[in-house]
Amino acid sequence: MPIVSAVNGLWADALDPIVQFRVDLAFSRHPSLLNQLYNVQTSSRAYEQVSGVGAISPDAFENYKNSGQIPEVDFDQGFKTTYEHVEYPIDFSIERKTIDDADFNTVFRTTERIGDSAFLFRETKAASVFNNAFSASHPGADGVALCSDSHPHSPFKSATQSNAFALALTKANLRTIREAMMAWTDDNGNKIAVVPDLLLVPPALEDDAIEIVNSIQDPDTANNTVNPMFGRFRVQAWHYLTDSTTWFLIDSMRMRQSLDWFDRVPFSVRLRDGDDRTVRAWWRAYQRFSFGFSDWRWIAGSNPS
């Protein structure tokens, strides 16, 4: 007897492992930049909070040598970021007649579209931090956009720093932004040793970025001059960046400390209980997560348009 032909509704239970397998197959078959860029974590609470911590002066370590007294240091409180997990459920169904007619291609296509869409949704959400990087409507904990010319040093200091530029992607402009990043300081004015190593670009700028970074000799001249940008950065294009001229220079180590993704409930699909499965069976796809950034000192963005 066919395993999915029972009149009493058991066809849906028999089909359920196939549905879950095809959804998971589609969800996991795409290369994801979310997992490469974000610090992906689990969570068991309704929300997560990340509190910034101020720095101490390196001079504190000189105190014992100079005075014989071991100093007691304290840290200023930094900006606090709250990540509230959001639910994202959808329902989809498969008709019994599809199974009675052995139309499994329709089942496969339907369920795989769910997995594809779930992946696309998460990747689009992850890219939204970059797509909204210059938007005052999407501020970070310090009250300004991720890429801004007015980042306050701390909640207690009015001095500001900038990580926003309006320069096209060229070798000279890449150098300008790299040097600016390496001059950033903490809340006490200490240089924080930012080391940019990742060039994140939309597909329209990928060829230009590769030429700048992977040319052994200067791509801007015919004099066989050494290209100092050679091998200095990894180039990464992302399909989900929406502005064709905006690009980002990133310290990937600091990025993983400040760019957070919390999976409260990982993406999953379950057969709905209690439904009448005589004609149609329903499944629910569900995920709950939050994401964002707790500090900006890992990225410089340039929006020349």
Image: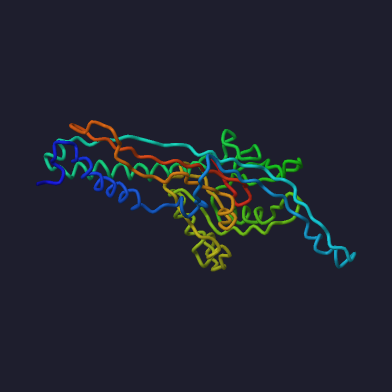
Q: How many tags in the picture? A: 0
Rendered residue at 32%/41% (across/down): 270
| Colouring used for the render | rainbow
Residue found at the far left of this picture: 1
Rendered residue at 53%/57% (across/down): 198
Q: Nearer the viewer, residue 116 or 134?
A: 116
| Residue 31 drawn at (x, y percent) | 38, 54
Quarter of the rendering occupied by the C terminus: top right
Rendered residue at 33%/45% (across/down): 116
Q: In the figure, residue 277 lies in which quadrant?
A: top left
Residue found at the far right of this picture: 67
| Residue 142 drawn at (x, y percent) | 66, 40
92 sits to left or right of 85 = left
Q: Nearer the viewer, residue 201 or 86?
A: 86
Q: Nearer the viewer, residue 289 or 303?
A: 289
| Residue 134 drawn at (x, y percent) | 57, 39
100 sits to left or right of 59 = left
| Residue 153 drawn at (x, y percent) | 72, 45
Q: Nearer the viewer, residue 68 or 130?
A: 68
Q: In the figure, residue 149 lies in which quadrant?
A: top right
Rendered residue at 35%/39% (across/down): 285
